[in-house]
Image: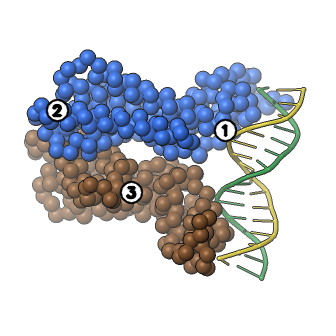
Chain colours: A brown, B blue, C green, D yellow
Amino acid sequence: MVSSKTSAGRSETKATVSPGAVREAALTLFAERGYHGTALSQIADVLGIRTPSLYNHMKSKQDLLRDIIADTTEQVWADYEQAVHSVGDVVERLRRAARVYALRHATHRREAIIVNRDVDSLEEPVRSEVLELRRRHAGAIRDLIEEGVREGRFTEPEPTLAAFGILEMCVSIARWFREDGPQSAEAVAETYSRYALRVAGLS
Amino acid sequence: MVSSKTSAGRSETKATVSPGAVREAALTLFAERGYHGTALSQIADVLGIRTPSLYNHMKSKQDLLRDIIADTTEQVWADYEQAVHSVGDVVERLRRAARVYALRHATHRREAIIVNRDVDSLEEPVRSEVLELRRRHAGAIRDLIEEGVREGRFTEPEPTLAAFGILEMCVSIARWFREDGPQSAEAVAETYSRYALRVAGLS
DNA sequence: CCTACCGATCGGTAGG
DNA sequence: CCTACCGATCGGTAGG
């Protein structure tokens, strides 16, 4: 991204920045300090340029947030659809839905933190669209549990509460997972998908 | 000149404010918009006074955040100790620890949201002290699961992951619980404490 | 409790 | 990519 940094944070050599580099820097700083806690001057510092130069690569600070959150939310839904696609068994469907959601939260930690902390800083109508997509996701998980209960595979009498619990348990992975930790993202996702089935009351 | 706004936020009659009222307003606004997303002028607006008058009831914005987060974190630990105090059975200990944690997140939603979203906006050394207390809590839950596994009551092979999952599942209650919803705080806490035992692998 | 006011910093624009 | 600069707003202080 930027070569030969001085101790003060800005680069010695002339920086060449791209929209992707700005987004990458925003991802790290928004995740660390929050949207309102991050100044554009801090993003510029990381990239080794002056604040006004950012505007060659983005439209506004709000646009940066919107792109990050909207893209991530859409990918979560796409993940879900692909995970359960052409899988018949309802237990296996829930297992895969939980596993892919958990895996994303281990592999895209910054995005997950930003979506969950700063979604309310989004301007309308994007904020409502994002919330609607998240509701759809939670509803799909609830429906899986209900279906499993009808088929006698799950026992949980409160599918809505269980769906929220399962999803938020997976979200929490983004808050503690370390790439250099003792477990791989895949192993953690596998473990949490087991928890999901237990919460649903796998019989 | 006392302009009497009726709809836009400030009060008609002369306001009498207390430290508790300032904290209450901060609680609501920090939870809604985040610490950095809330201006002191907004807190003053809610109370019907001018921003500088806030300083008769608090030391600084940062102090407001610190009081909210430190008090809440200490109460969570006190809750835990009281819940497991003089309870011998390890399954019952975990059930009670999860239930009291879940219950607090249903009954103190604003505090919970602020602790989880804005703890990193705390200045040192308070931030580190709060994080240490939270680690101690998670460690205590993990120890309960390990103890239960040793006694053959639980089966979970990853007590650390299970402890994080259980706690964060309970935290999530603060994000969706409504006092006027279909379930009481106690009922939700009861349900989530069942989930906790399932995640631990109650045999 | 208020008005008056402070320096600092914010996101963003003009113009090259 | 830069410098120069904008109006708005921030948390906070002085002084009554």
Which residue does the numbered mark 3 point to in the structure image? A109
Q: In what quadrant of the picture does the C terminus of chain B appear?
A: top left
Q: Are marks 2 and 3 in contact (CB under 8 Å)?
A: no
Q: CA distance from mark 3 to mark 1?
A: 31 Å
Q: Is residue B97 above or below residue A82?
A: above
Looking at this view, is B122 or A74 the one in front?
B122
Q: Secondary structure at mark 1?
A: helix
Question: Looking at the image, which residue is at 63% across and 28% down?
Answer: B22
Relative placement, left or right, of A31 versus B13 is: left
**Amino acid type, callout 1:** Leu
The local secondary structure at tag 2 comes to helix
Q: Which mark is residue B40?
A: 1
Check if mark 2 and mark 3 are on a common chain.
no
Residue pointed to by mark 2: B148
**Which residue type does callout 2 highlight?**
Gly
> Can you give x and y, in whole percent of width and height, for residue D2 in the image?
71, 75
Give the percent coordinates (x, y) of residue A137: 32, 52
- Disc 3 is placed on an element classified as helix
- As shown in the figure, which amino acid type bears the numbered disc 3? Arg
Task: From the image, state whether disc 3 or disc 1 is nearer to you.
Answer: 3
Pinpoint residue A164: horizontal percent, then vertical percent: 31, 42
Q: Quadrant of residue A179?
A: bottom left
Vertical placement of residue B177 versus D1, above or below:
above
